[in-house]
Image (cartoon, rainbow, N blue to C red):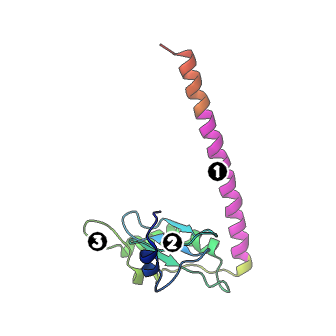
Amino acid sequence: MKYVAKDEYDNRISRLKPIAGDIVYGREGTYGNAAILPDGYDFCLGQRVMLFRADSKKCLPRYLLQALISDDVKRQADSKSMGATVAHVNVADAKRFLIALPPINLQKQFADFVAIADKSKNTAQSQISKLNQEKEAAIQKYFKS
């Protein structure tokens, strides 16, 4: 993320202003990384990314995010990846990604499950980090030269 001047921002949002819930998708280099834009910020897109906006009547943003970072969509992107020096996904190809679209209630159940799993994963990573710090402190204490 970087900040841009007001005139640059206005220029970048002239076609479409990103809003909370939109998904930003990396399309060059390590393409396929994606994130949902949070509330409370004014965003504009830079180069090498594209924006997905879910139709809320058909698809939940959290479900679409998981679909876009799935192995299935990654395989589709890999099959279309172009570029001699830097692999990338064209916007036109990304528009043709095939994504399973279950009913909204199942998407919500899935999104809720992913949120719980992510929370557990973050807790575990935090605990591992804390244990590693304690281990390093113990090593310093007991093996000090």
110 on left or right of 44: right
Question: Is the residue under label 3 in contact with that under label 2 (CB below 8 Å)?
Answer: no
Q: Position of residue 104 (x, y in %)?
A: 71, 80
Q: Earlier in the sequence, mark 1 or mark 2?
A: 2
On the question of residue 94 being in view, the answer is: no
Identity, as a three-letter code, of the amino acid under mark 3: Gly
Q: Nearer the viewer, residue 88 or 73?
A: 88
Q: Earlier in the sequence, mark 3 or mark 1?
A: 3
Q: Quadrant of residue 49?
A: bottom left
**Which residue lies at the image location 70% right of the left edge and 82% below the top edge?**
103
**Which residue lies at the image location 68% right of the left edge and 57% below the top edge?**
117
Identity, as a three-letter code, of the amino acid under mark 2: Val
Nearer the observer: mark 1 or 2; the answer is: 2
Q: Which residue is mark 2?
A: 24
Q: Position of residue 69 (x, y in %)?
A: 52, 67
Please tell me the numbered disc located at residue 122: 1
41 on left or right of 7: right
Label 3: how many residues lie within 10 Å, few (<14), some (14-19) or many (20+)?
few
Nearer the observer: mark 2 or 3; the answer is: 2
- Name the dominant secondary structure of the magenta segment: helix
Q: Which residue is mark 3?
A: 83
Numbered range of the magenta stretch: 106-132
Q: Secondary structure at mark 1?
A: helix
Identity, as a three-letter code, of the amino acid under mark 1: Asn
Q: Is residue 83 magenta?
A: no
Q: Earlier in the sequence, mark 2 or mark 3?
A: 2
